[in-house]
Structures are given as structure tokens and as C-alpha cells.
Amino acid sequence: MRHSLIRRFRRSSTPEHISILPQKNHFGFTTHANPVNPEVDIIFVHGVDGGSFTSWTRNEDPRLYWPREWLPKELELSRARIHTYGYNLAPKRDYSSECEFASQFLTELICSPLWFGTLPIILVGHSTGGMIIKRAYTIAKSSHLYKRPCQAIQSIIFISTPHVPLDLASFKKWKKINPCLTTKPAMDYAIERLSSQFQTVDRNIRIFSFVEAKPTSIGRGRRRVMICSRRNCVVGLPREIVVPVVASHKSMTKFKSPNDANYATFYRHLLAALREIREVNRTPLTPPPAYTPYWVSPAEYQWTRRPYKIQRRATW
């Protein structure tokens, strides 16, 4: 009886390669890496019909949850705080709720105990998540309440985010993925208004626009169509870098392994944004102040350093 229970327990135990953490889409901020001396905050925002876990994981495999499993192990990102942000954007909700989620994102940003805004921020948005980032940035620029986190945002990475209104055929295909888009005029008005506001806000921020280069399979017939082309994914700002990726709209953020070419492409540009932030925030090196032990008075400390000064003068 005892041996049978042991065998049953061993069979039902969790394998070593599966994480014991709950694998689900959390709302709000979830921190995956929090080093002792951080230098930057990297925040991932998912799109419609996705989540803070499913949008960044291939086949919902916890081992392929790369913001938590791969990025913290990169040597160059050892001092980066990595977060994912989740929100409940149901497909039946109206497209105007994008502004509501942008305000909610900013509110949780300034109310977080992690003190967002004290470190440079890199925002990564996929699909509609990039539009929420744009809306949040324009709101933060026009309000003094969000001044601290707004000044900390120094780079934005858009992944398959539409910045130009789509044509009718693309809208019908886009609506199958994002059912919350009710009418094409409403979507075109929202995209045009948001893009015009974003272009007049700030031209000094570094932008990376990842463009899909493969069609996406949609519908029962599995038709392969291009959801968001290069014309729709380009912002048009001077400090923008357009990066074509050989992947479909849904697989732009889902990688097979750390050796995946698309993951390497994303990591290189993320590292380029981080290095540029380091160059901007670099301060000239100054010699450290003389160390005075707390158990020695200033007079005694000067007396202890006097032989060193005399010896230095003698050698000179």
C-alpha cells in the first residue's frame, strides 16, 4: 500500500520544467524581475483578445513565457526591472474604451509601490496595446499629474500597431481578430486622431516599429491575409526605426526558443534602446569622497593621513 501511494504521488507530481507559479492572465502590473540596483523599467502591454501571459507565450507553455523566463537571464538586462501589464478588454466592449484603459494604466503607474518614474521607462505594446500606450503618453503629456512617469518614458516599441487607417478589406480581417471594432469610421477616426496627437507631442523619444511580413490565418478556411501592413505600422517620426519581422500578426510576440531569429531581432533593438538610455543618462565620473571611519574624529583622521602626505612630499 505504501509503495503504491509513493508511485502514485510520483506520477502526479509536477515535472521539473513546469513552473509552479499560476499561469494565467493577471490584471494590472506583474513584476518578473526586480534587481537590487535597477537602471530601467521595461513594461509590456498586450493587445485585444490577449493577456499578460498568453500574448507573450507560445502555445501557453510556461517555459516559453519569455518576459519572465528569458529576458531576466540576459546579461545586459541584469539591472532591468521587467513588468507585464494586463487589462480586461472584452471583445464585446466598444472601441472607445481604449481611452479608459489608458487612463487606468497611468493611474496604476503613479500609484504603484514600485515608484515608476524614478527610472527610465521602455514601453512595449503589441497591436492595440501600442495604441493604449500612445493614448496614455498623450494624456500624460497634457496633464501635470503624470509629469514624473511621462518624463521617464524614453523609448517605445510598437509591435504590429496600426498608426494609419486601414482599408476596407483589411478592416474586415482586423475585425475578426478584434471584434470590439464595431464600425470602420469609428476606428479610422480613433486612429487618425490618436496619431495626430502623438506626432505633435514629442519628437525626441526613440521609437521602434516592428512590422509583420507574413500573412495571418483567419477563419474556418484558414485564409492567409495581411492584417497590418508596413504602410499602417509606420508612425512617421524622425527618431523612428522600422524593423520588419518574418512573422504573422499573432506570432510577432511568440517565440520558439531563445535562439529564435525573431527573438534575437527584438532583443537587439531592446538592447539598442537601453544603450541609448545609458548614453543619455550618463554623468561625468567624479572621484569619490575621502572615506572617514565613523569611529575616528576629524582631527584624528587628519593626523592619521599626515604621514602619508609627508611621505608623498618627500618622494616628490
Image (spheres, rainbow, N blue to C red):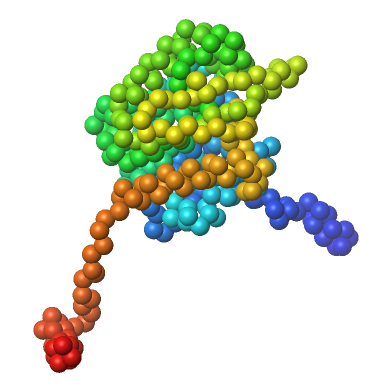
Residue 82 point in image, percent of width and height: 47, 47
Quadrant position of the C terminus in the picture: bottom left
Q: Residue at x 53, y 54 (%)?
A: 74
In the displayed structure image, the side of residue 143 where residue 193 appears, left or right: right
In the displayed structure image, the side of residue 5 where residue 162 appears, left or right: left
* Residue 102 appears in view: no
Q: Residue at x 15, y 92 (%)?
A: 314
Q: Quadrant of residue 299?
A: bottom left
In the displayed structure image, the side of residue 76 where residue 14 appears, left or right: right
217 w.r.t. 71: above or below: above
Quadrant position of the N terminus in the picture: bottom right
Residue 112 point in image, percent of width and height: 38, 42
Outermost residue on the front side: it is 316
Residue 116 point in image, percent of width and height: 35, 43
Q: Residue at x 55, y 42 (%)?
A: 265
Q: Nearer the viewer, residue 273 or 26?
A: 273
Q: Nearer the viewer, residue 254 or 28?
A: 254
179 w.r.t. 61: above or below: above
- Figure disc tally: 0
In the displayed structure image, the side of residue 12 where residue 66 appears, left or right: left
Q: Residue at x 47, y 14 (%)?
A: 165
Q: Quadrant of residue 174?
A: top right
* Residue 255 appears in view: yes
Q: Nearer the viewer, residue 53 or 214?
A: 214
Residue 163 point in image, percent of width and height: 45, 21
250 w.r.t. 183: above or below: below
Q: Quadrant of residue 136?
A: top left
